[in-house]
Amino acid sequence: MKSSEWLKNIFSIAYYLMIIGWIILFGFLLYAIFISPGDILEILRDAEEFKIKSKNALYTSLAYELSSSGVWIYILYLFKNLMKDLIFRPLFTSLQIASFKLIGQLIILITIVDALSIFVFKTIFQGRLELSFELFDFWFVIAIGLFLIFLSQIFDQARIIKEENELTV
């Protein structure tokens, strides 16, 4: 199997696993709202990022995690479709260029929003001011987003050169 097929399959598996995780998280939120927030609070009481001690913190963090993971699901969906387009269609199309750019922008946006939300949640729910960006968790992911935007520019230049070459033949 070619590496492109492997990559397409990896994106597909990650996409479907993220959807399953999103559904489970949505179930936690519904359970917390309508049945028993105490049970969910007990499960999440010792979370690594910040300790959830109140219902408001629970509802806020679950709602945020749902929206954040929804954006990551959309990013994986775009990647999955981009891989299909790169494998089965001609290269350097406008769709591929726009997909690389959009994926890069979304990765940068959600990474910055995630970092800010952790800062805000810790400040509000724990009453402590802490700001830390680890190399892999923040800067590396930002670099991946920037690389995808750069790749979209390369694809755009290649599309222009390809169109010029087709006109001169």
Image (tube, helix red, strand yellow):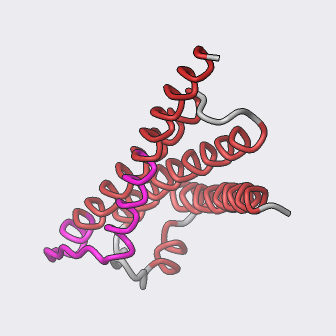
Q: Which stretch is magenta?
A: 121-149
Residue 59 percent coordinates (x, y): 42, 58
Q: Is residue 134 magenta?
A: yes
Residue 152 percent coordinates (x, y): 46, 40
Of residues 1 and 158, the one drawn nearer to the viewer in this rendering: 158
Quadrant for the N terminus, please: bottom right
Seen in the picture, residue 150 relative to 28 is either above or below; the reply is: above
Seen in the picture, residue 69 relative to 123 is either above or below; the reply is: above
Location of residue 144 by image quarter: bottom left
Q: Is residue 92 magenta?
A: no
Q: Please state if 115 lies on the left or on the right of 127 as rendered.
A: right
Name which residue lies at 40% across and 63% down: 141
Name which residue lies at 49% across and 25% down: 160
Name which residue lies at 47% across and 32% down: 156
Seen in the picture, residue 162 relative to 132 is either above or below; the reply is: above
Kindly give the residue lying farthest to the left in the view shown.
129
Of residues 122 and 13, the one drawn nearer to the viewer in this rendering: 13
Name which residue lies at 45% across and 33% down: 157
Residue 62 percent coordinates (x, y): 46, 60
Kindly give the residue lying farthest to the top in the view shown.
167
Residue 18 percent coordinates (x, y): 64, 59
Q: Please state if 110 lies on the left or on the right of 19 as rendered.
A: left
